Amino acid sequence: MSVLLEFAMFPTDKGESISAYVSKIIQMIRESGVTYQLTPMGTVIETETIAEALAIVQQSYEVLELDCDRVYSSLKFDIRKGKSKCMTKKITSVENIIGEVNK
Amino acid sequence: MSVLLEFAMFPTDKGESISAYVSKIIQMIRESGVTYQLTPMGTVIETETIAEALAIVQQSYEVLELDCDRVYSSLKFDIRKGKSKCMTKKITSVENIIGEVNK
Amino acid sequence: MSVLLEFAMFPTDKGESISAYVSKIIQMIRESGVTYQLTPMGTVIETETIAEALAIVQQSYEVLELDCDRVYSSLKFDIRKGKSKCMTKKITSVENIIGEVNK
Amino acid sequence: MSVLLEFAMFPTDKGESISAYVSKIIQMIRESGVTYQLTPMGTVIETETIAEALAIVQQSYEVLELDCDRVYSSLKFDIRKGKSKCMTKKITSVENIIGEVNK
């Protein structure tokens, strides 16, 4: 199974500059060993079960919980049975049709 | 703590009519006893911990898993320490400022 | 055509209490005459074209623009050709299968 | 002003394989000249006004409209006054704190 999760999570009680908080979450994800990609609007991770992905969401909140009174998060899942490595395959399948992207 | 979660989850391999699948998820949520509200675009639940909300997400996927090969989900969290019953209070706080809505 | 749009839009540079800003957006939507429903996590509107829905998004930003340096928004669309009044029909179609919800 | 928009848009009446439809949208975005990045879960674009970003959303729907009876889309905006080139700066600001990511 391939579970792709794209998510952003940030405090809304800390003013405009939140990169210090976001960085703590990325650091936790990087250390977790999960396959991930940081984008300008969030982080994409790929796991083999939905439970693993949800555990990363919970741990992300725990990273912020001590310091932040209000936290917002936006997430989306694309879950496929019988698939793997969709993180790279999804972009490749577009490039197979229209040629190179992200030049 | 108040954890508000708004989410939609549906199969993308079953064609245009998906209310049978969505209904199974709502039925599970209704039976779970969690505070919930069905909207035209998803379901809002309120829990006291993020773990409880994530468990509902996992159970929603499990409802679809047997029948569906591809599942999409869009979610957002608003998590506040030291608050409760935000499900009703958020609409009331708007109405306190601009008067009745949802007439 | 039925265009259902669920969205939340709020400043992230104004601290934890944002109901004054959100209220201004709801007031604009209420005065616009569009079919809408305020939920605990956002607002659902239904329009007949995507252009009308996107105009509401732009006007929502314009309501905040003067006062806010940073604005976040999360949105989802469900767009169906040859349909109308999906705002009420979607909940009814679930209730036809599993009985009353939102008691 | 920097308008960052991350979005995914796809038909839900075409079964599990949707890369042909998604590719048409990416091709339109690539030809539009807007700054963009394809990710495994959507596309991020950066524009100088919200109107430009919303025009890309409308054109994306128009790409699908002819062939598809039902279209779903999930979007998020991060809009900042007095900023530019946030598409690259947001990742750099994280890397300045915790070192290289996306290895």
Image (cartoon, coloured by chain):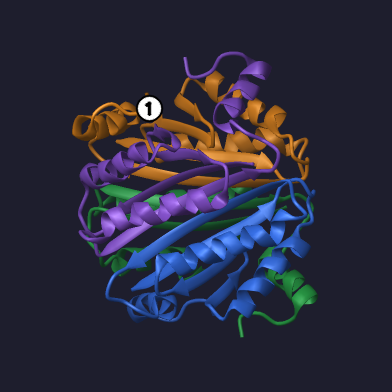
Chain colours: A orange, B green, C blue, D purple
Residue drawn at 20 percent across, 59 percent down: D67
Q: B16 left or right of D72?
A: left
Residue D11 seen = no
Q: Position of residue D12 (x, y in %)?
A: 28, 57
| Along the viewing direction, whichever of B30 and A60 lies nearer the viewer | A60
| Along the viewing direction, whichever of D90 and C87 lies nearer the viewer | D90
Residue drawn at 75 percent across, 76 percent down: B98
Name which residue type carries label 1.
Asn
Residues packed near mark 1 inside 10 Å, few (<14), some (14 to 19) or many (20 plus): few
Rendered position, D89 above or below D57:
above
Residue drawn at 57 percent across, 81 percent down: C33
Rendered position, B38 above or below B61:
below
Rendered position, A9 above or below B90:
above
Q: Position of residue A53 (x, y in %)?
A: 46, 36
Residue of label 1: A102
- Quadrant occupied by the C terminus of chain B: bottom right
Chain under callout 1: A
Total count of labels: 1
Residue drawn at 59 percent across, 69 percent down: C39
Q: Position of residue B27 (x, y in %)?
A: 41, 68
Can you name the residue that lies furthest to the bottom here?
A: B103
| Along the viewing direction, whichever of A4 and D74 lies nearer the viewer | D74
Q: Quadrant of residue A66?
A: top right
| Along the viewing direction, whichever of D94 and D57 lies nearer the viewer | D57
Q: Secondary structure at mark 1?
A: loop
Q: Position of residue A42 (x, y in %)?
A: 53, 36
Residue D48 seen = yes
